[in-house]
Image (spheres, helix red, strand yellow):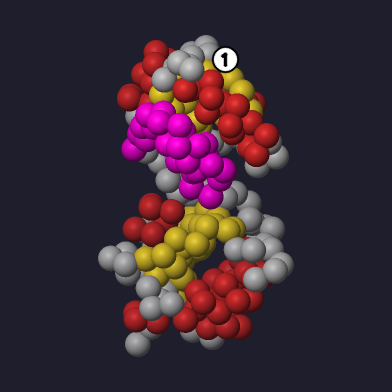
Amino acid sequence: MKLYLVPTPIGNLEDITLRALRVLREEVDVILAEDTRTSGNLLKHYEISKPMQAFHLNNEHVVVERIAERIANGERMALVTDAGTPAISDPGFMLVRECIKRGVEVECLPGATAFVPALVNSGLAADHFIFEGFLPHKKGRQTKIKQIVDNEYTTILYESPFRLVKTLEQLAEAAGPERRVSVARELTKIHEENVRGTLEEVIKYFKEKEVKGEIVIIIEGTANNQ
C-alpha cells in the first residue's frame, strides 16, 4: 500500500525522469490524473498502459477517502497532474493528508515545477521567496495584492493568460509602476518567453500582443527595491 506523487513535464515531454517512468510503468496499479486525456497522451507517448482514474477539483471531496481506503487495503497508486508536481496549487494535498492519517506510505518523486525555473530565470532575488499560487478572483483579492507588494521577499504567482494584464495593472496600482517583475510563459516549450522589466514596461508589452500559455509572475520584494 503506497501513494506515489509523480511530477510530469510542464511542457517538454523530455522533462520526465527515468524514475518517474519506472514508477508509472512498473510500481503502481492505478494512475490518478487531473485530466485523464492529458495524462493519457503522456502515457501513450511513453507506451505506458495502466488504468486511470480522474482526480480533480470537481470530485476530490467525494473520492479522497475512498481512494485512501483503497490504498490502505493494498492498492498502489500514483497521483499526477496535467503538468508539474502534484499538490502544488491543486487538491493533491488532501489525498496526501488522508493517506498520512491512515498510516499509508507516501513517496514524492522530484521533478518539474513551473515556479522554480521562472524564479531562477527572473534575475530577482531567489534566496528568500514566497509562493502564493493563484490569487483569489474576487473576495480577498485586493487584500492579498496589498500583502504581496508590501512583502520584503520575492513573491511568485500563477496566473491565467486571460487575467495577466489585469493582475499586472492591479500590482502596479498597489506597488507603483517602477516595481520590477518577470513574467514567464510557455516554460520548456518551443515558444518559451521570459519578459523582465518594470511593471509599467511589462504591462505595455503584454497589452500589445495576444497572450497564450501558462503564466508565472515573479514580483520584486521591498528589500530588493531600494
Span of residues in magenta: 83-110
The type of residue carrying mark 1 is: Pro
- Does the rendering let one see residue 180? yes
What residue is drawn where x is 61% and y is 83%? 173
Q: Is residue 85 magenta?
A: yes
Residue 215, image quadrant: bottom right
Q: Relative to 80, does residue 180 appear above or below in the rendering?
A: below
Q: Is residue 147 magenta?
A: no
- The residue that mark 1 highlights is 51
Crowding at dot 1, Cα within 10 Å, few <14 / some 14-19 / many 20+, comes out as few
Q: Where residue 176 sits in the image (x, y, percent)? A: 54, 86
Q: Nearer the viewer, residue 195 or 101?
A: 101
Q: Where residue 42 sits in the image (x, y, percent)? A: 52, 25
- Does the rendering let one see residue 190? no
Q: Nearer the viewer, residue 8 or 203?
A: 8
Q: Relative to 64, does residue 40 appear above or below in the rendering?
A: above
Q: Where residue 157 sits in the image (x, y, percent)? A: 51, 61
Residue 55, image quadrant: top right
What residue is drawn where x is 33% and y is 25%? 19
Q: Relative to 105, does residue 111 appear above or below in the rendering?
A: below
What residue is drawn where x is 50% and y is 32%? 80
What residue is drawn where x is 41% and y is 28%? 104
Q: Where residue 193 sits in the image (x, y, percent)? A: 49, 55
